[in-house]
Amino acid sequence: MLLPALMASAQKNTPQSYIEQFKEDAIRIMHETGVPASIVLGVAMHESGCGNSKLAKNLNNQFGVKGSGRIVYVNSKKKKISTAYKRYGSVYDSFQDFARIMTERAEFSGLAMNLTHFDYEGWAHGIQKHGYASDRHWSKYVLDIIKHYQLNALDEKPADTATQKQANPDQLAQNHQF
């Protein structure tokens, strides 16, 4: 009985499992900060490989955020790793910090003042334009993830959130086809 549980925990996250596990956190962050849930999830999925990157697994760091100093952690092979990346207590804490960066850092703070949480495309282009990533295709990658998994369906009005909490991403996609 223990072996299947261990094997399941060793498996990689799929995009669907990542969305299901963290969509409520992303919606909560959206309502607290105005950063679209689709952006929080889409960027996290892109940057962390759906939570499968070494930073995500070892530090709960979904966005590759650097810290103010060096930290040491022990990886799965019992090797000590020294890194400048930030460690978070949980994935939710990583989401919160990303939203804080988007709303409080000077280079990004104008996005929250000028864009609604419904304008995920504006957010993606604005984040790239203001220097979040050096890859000139970064916003396209993030937007492709958002559109493919219809994460923008999570960017609804608070009254619609109760319905979304009961729906899975496939149901959300069916409810929001154009």
Image: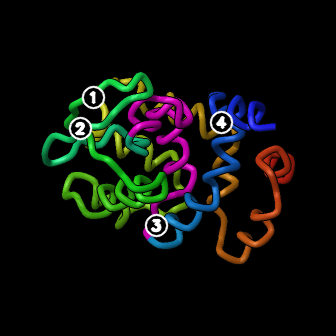
Q: Find numbered disc 4 in the image and state the secondary structure of the residue it sits on.
A: helix
The reply, left or right, for residue 73 in relation to residue 9 is: left
Give the colouring mode of the picture.
rainbow
Give me the residue at 75% from left, 64% from top: 165
Q: Say few, some or many: other residues with alpha carbon within 10 Å of mark 2 (under 14 / 14 to 19 / 20 or more).
A: few
Label ID, residue 9: 4
As drawn, the label of residue 80 is 1
Please give the residue where the numbered disc 2 appears in the rendered image: 72
State the extent of the magenta-drawn residues as a range: 33-58
Amino acid type, mark 1: Lys
Q: Which residue is mark 3?
A: 34
Residue 70 found in image quarter: top left
Q: Which numbered disc flags the more N-terminal residue, 3 or 1?
A: 3
Indicate yes or no whether the magenta region holds residue 57: yes
Q: Name the amino acid, label 4.
A: Ser
Rendered position, 93 above or below 1? below
Q: Are marks 1 and 2 in contact (CB under 8 Å)?
A: yes
Is residue 134 shown above or below 70? above
Circle 2 SS class: strand
The CA distance from mark 4 to mark 3 is: 33 Å
Q: Residue furthest bottom?
A: 159
